[in-house]
Amino acid sequence: MAKKKENSTNSINAQYITECDLTYAVCKIGGRWKLLILCKLENGKLRFSELRDRIAGITERMLTLQLREMEKEGLLKRTVHAQVPPRVDYELTEIARELIPIWRQLEDWGKKHKKLVKEQVLEVDEN
Amino acid sequence: MAKKKENSTNSINAQYITECDLTYAVCKIGGRWKLLILCKLENGKLRFSELRDRIAGITERMLTLQLREMEKEGLLKRTVHAQVPPRVDYELTEIARELIPIWRQLEDWGKKHKKLVKEQVLEVDEN
DNA sequence: CCGTATCCTAAAAGATACTG
DNA sequence: CAGTATCTTTTAGGATACGG
């Protein structure tokens, strides 16, 4: 399966750094897609195709990868309904729901920062 | 200088996605080092070498890159004191200080999740 | 002391084709 | 419908050497 170099400094640092609870947390929800997926599930279960359709730009591969990872880490519960055609849905776990107020605040902060950048013409370029 | 592909889907997605205030915010503080740097500055100014020495594993290159980026985005204020040897210190801006309660909560959440993983033996492996 | 420059590796993300 | 498998591209991160 997926090969992983365990001895690169990169890898070592990645592990080492999660001794800090803060960076540990950031790792759980970091990356381009995770929070985007989680917040779509804020109001209840969604199935694979619903998630895919609501998250613009995501490929099925990336969606699968992120879902699997978050399931493994206890953030998502995956339910397979034995029927044809198959139906699988995803929902937030308890510990994931505890993130909701946090990501709401982050969202507010993001909005505020964006506004600030626009108004004060902070030199943030587009990349 | 640093070449960037502007037309890769990767790049386009990265931009597109920041229309969401939440992912926008995550981008500002994401990555391995940013929050780690910010939280070191929670209690006041620090100079370059102090930051370097307090953040285990970081290279000068990475520290510089992250500092420059966060300065550009209005999260850090950089002050150069005209003296020999040179002295440069970094401090949080107002908007960055507004993140403090958020990262504190994230830190708590991280601690809790870590504990849960340990107790319930959630299948989170070591990478 | 506070960085830059150059080169390199590893990981993240994407394209495309295919399947139970 | 809900994914896998395979391969390629792009970016993040690191090693090392050097400079004002």
Image: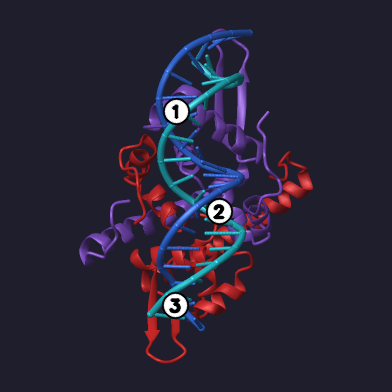
Chain colours: A purple, B red, C blue, D cyan
Would you identify the image quadrant in which residue A124 lies? bottom left
Amino acid type at image mark 1: Thr
Badge 2 or badge 1: first in the primary sequence = 2
Specify few, some or many for label 1: CA neighbours under 10 Å numbering under 14, 14-19, or 20 or more.
Answer: few
- Residue B46 lies, with reference to residue A111, above or below; the image says below
Specify few, some or many for label 2: CA neighbours under 10 Å numbering under 14, 14-19, or 20 or more.
Answer: many
Q: Which of B14/A51 is in front? A: B14
Q: Is there one chain holding both mark 2 and mark 3?
A: no
Q: Is there one chain holding both mark 1 and mark 3?
A: no
Q: Nearer the viewer, mark 2 or mark 3?
A: 3
- Chain containing the residue with disc 3: B
Name the residue: 55% across, 73% down.
Answer: B40
Label ID, residue A59: 1
Q: Which of A127/A110 is in front? A: A127
Measured Cα–Cα span from mark 2 to mark 3: 23 Å
Would you identify the image quadrant in which residue B52 lies? bottom right
List the residue tagged with mark 3: B90
List the residue tagged with mark 2: A26
